[in-house]
């Protein structure tokens, strides 16, 4: 039997397959065994409720999807009272994604969530392309200094493992990853979506209510792979790869480039059973190739 377990800092996963934030719901338990997942990442929450961006918020593109949700959620109190109880029965580690307008909000979210049972780690969303972050110009993860300040503030507020979710919309993502590592992140997640848009030629209007959104899916996989490879050679903390993974071959590519684990997002909307299938097929691939541990393929790219 191949050992599929991996470690993200102190977070231990029985396999490297996680669901991406905003793509998982407890109702999926009716379709496959969610307890088999390496971890479940819940939709990003903020301190106060957000209404999100105007609809339409989703548009399909060639080999991908645009989304412009805008971090719609009912806030921290509603999450603790109404959302978290619905996933407490899940045996896989639960990772909560958080976003704030400033250091104080990020730190307060981390502090309050640290006191809540069942949460195994926090994912710090520093890179949603569809919202404005307080008075900051651009995305948090486009500035290494601001990234470091936010991660440091969260680090000082919790002992939970921290995953910094970075944007691909930078000149050199390894600089941002290094800043997150220095500030105390246990891992970096690469990558969030790319700003993009689509147009309806009949109405001559944008297909998204927010005009622009974030592009995800297979269309971005080659770029995401390259960024994982770049960062793997610059930081010592684990990397979680994300971007267009629809089958085990995609997941293996990310791990060969240096990812310790992967997140699956867009493919879940096509078939919620995808993460479970990827886990089974990764095991078959490793057994066929003669590996005893999945850790042995991480960073194994023959470049």
Image (cartoon, rainbow, N blue to C red):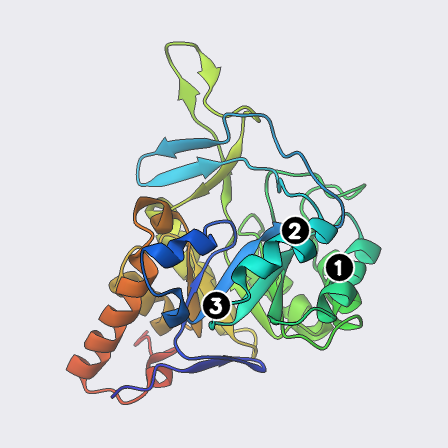
Nearer the N terminus, badge 3 or badge 2? 2
Q: Which quarter of the figure is the C terminus placed in?
A: bottom left
Q: Give the number of the mark in front: 3 or 2.
A: 3
Relative image position of residue 291 (x, y in whole percent): 25, 87
Relative image position of residue 91 (x, y in whole percent): 47, 73
Q: Residues within 10 Å of mark 1 (few under 14, many from 20)?
A: many
- Cα–Cα gap, marks 3 and 2: 19 Å
Residue at the extreme top of the image, as rendered: 203
In the picture provided, is 250 more to the left or to the right than 48? left
Q: Is residue 89 visible?
A: yes
- Cα–Cα gap, marks 1 and 3: 22 Å
Q: Residues within 10 Å of mark 3 (few under 14, many from 20)?
A: some
Instruction: Specify the label residue 109 is tagged with.
Output: 1
Nearer the N terminus, badge 1 or badge 2? 2
Q: Secondary structure at mark 2?
A: strand
Q: Which quarter of the figure is the N terminus placed in?
A: bottom left
Relative image position of residue 177 (x, y in whole percent): 60, 66
Residue 280: quadrant of the picture: bottom left
Asked if labels 2 and 1 touch by Cβ distance under 8 angstroms, the answer is yes
Q: Is residue 257 visible?
A: no
From the viewer's perspective, is residue 241 above or below residue 26?
A: below
Asked if labels 3 and 1 touch by Cβ distance under 8 angstroms, the answer is no
From the viewer's perspective, is residue 246 above or below residue 40?
A: above
Q: Residue at label 3?
A: 90
In the picture provided, is 100 more to the left or to the right than 39? right
Q: Residue at label 2?
A: 45
Q: Secondary structure at mark 3?
A: loop
Instruction: Specify the label residue 93 is tagged with.
Output: none
């Amino acid at each position: 039997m191949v050992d599929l377990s991996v470690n993200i800092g102190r977070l231990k996963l029985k396999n490297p397959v996680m669901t991406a934030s905003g793509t998982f719901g407890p109702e999926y338990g009716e379709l496959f065994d969610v307890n088999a997942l390496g971890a479940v990442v819940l939709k990003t929450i903020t301190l106060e409720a957000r209404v999100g961006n105007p609809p339409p918020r989703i548009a399909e593109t060639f080999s991908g999807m645009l989304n412009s949700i805008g971090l719609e959620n009912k806030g921290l109190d509603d999450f603790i009272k109404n959302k978290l109880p619905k996933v407490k029965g899940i045996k896989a580690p639960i990772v909560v994604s958080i976003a704030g307008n400033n250091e104080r909000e990020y730190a307060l979210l981390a502090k309050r969530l640290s006191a809540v049972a069942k949460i195994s780690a926090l994912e710090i969303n520093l890179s949603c392309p569809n919202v404005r972050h307080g008075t900051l110009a651009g995305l948090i993860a486009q500035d290494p200094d601001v990234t470091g300040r936010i991660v440091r503030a969260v680090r000082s507020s919790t002992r939970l493992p921290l995953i910094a979710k970075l944007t691909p919309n930078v000149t050199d993502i390894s600089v941002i990853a290094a800043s997150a590592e220095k500030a105390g992140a246990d891992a970096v997640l690469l990558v969030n979506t790319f700003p993009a848009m689509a147009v309806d030629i009949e109405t001559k209007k944008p297909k998204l209510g927010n005009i622009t959104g974030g592009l995800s899916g297979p269309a971005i996989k080659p770029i995401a792979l390259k960024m994982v490879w770049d960062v793997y050679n610059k930081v010592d903390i684990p990397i979680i790869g994300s971007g267009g993974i629809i089958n085990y071959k995609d997941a293996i590519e990310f791990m060969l480039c240096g990812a310790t684990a992967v997140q699956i997002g867009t493919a879940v909307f096509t078939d919620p059973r995808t993460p479970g299938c990827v886990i089974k097929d990764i095991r078959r691939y490793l057994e066929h190739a003669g590996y005893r541990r999945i850790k042995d393929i991480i960073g194994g790219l023959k470049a």
